[in-house]
Amino acid sequence: MKILVRNLARHTTEDKLRSLFAVHGTLQSCTIVMDKETGESKGFAFVEMPKVGEAKAAMKTLNGSEVDGMKIRVKKAEEAAAKADSGSAVDTDSE
């Protein structure tokens, strides 16, 4: 399952995200989306976990938690957002 992680601090690393999600199960991938021009984080990432149950547990536990001073949002990534490398993540919740 692909997971979208939003509202990341610009200095949050992939290693930090991996350690947060690894507590909940196996990670297939973890990628922070970077700005092509500046090389800096765009403030969101995609994490892929092969086991749906583990992914759901991670989403439930980590959504709203504080990471590097920012309250992150964690939810299932839509396929269009997961394929976008331009940095325009799709937010499907009607909050």
Image (cartoon, helix red, strand yellow):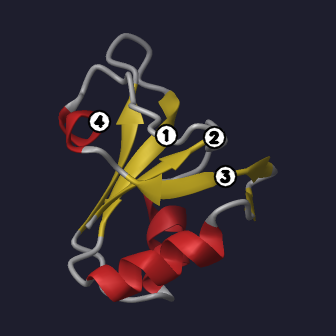
How many other residues sit within 10 Å of disc 4, few (<14), some (14-19) or many (≥20)? some
**In x, y percent, where is residue 50?**
21, 78
Gap between marks 3 and 2 measured at Cα: 5 Å
**In x, y percent, where is residue 36?**
32, 17
How many other residues sit within 10 Å of disc 3, few (<14), some (14-19) or many (≥20)? some
Query: If the image is split into quadrants, where does the C terminus sit?
Result: top right
As rendered, which of 63 and 33 lies closer to the eye? 63
Task: Determine contact: label 3, label 2, CB under 8 Å.
Answer: yes
Gap between marks 2 and 1 measured at Cα: 6 Å
Foreground tag (3 vs 4):
4
Q: How many labels does the image show?
A: 4
In the shown orientation, is residue 54 left or right of residue 86? right
Callout 3: SS: loop
The amino acid type, in three-letter code, at marker 2 is Asn
The amino acid type, in three-letter code, at marker 1 is Phe
Q: What residue is disc 2 on?
A: 7
Q: What residue is disc 1 on?
A: 44
Q: What residue is disc 3 on?
A: 72
How many other residues sit within 10 Å of disc 2, few (<14), some (14-19) or many (≥20)? some
Disc nearer the start of the sequence (3/4) = 3
How many other residues sit within 10 Å of disc 1, few (<14), some (14-19) or many (≥20)? many
**In x, y percent, where is residue 77?**
34, 50
Task: Determine contact: label 2, label 1, CB under 8 Å.
Answer: yes
Foreground tag (2 vs 4):
4
Task: Determine contact: label 3, label 4, CB under 8 Å.
Answer: no
Disc nearer the start of the sequence (1/4) = 1
The amino acid type, in three-letter code, at marker 4 is Ala
Callout 2: SS: loop
Callout 4: SS: helix
Q: What residue is disc 4 on?
A: 81
Disc nearer the start of the sequence (2/1) = 2
User: Which residue is depicted at the point 72% across and 60% down?
Assistant: 64
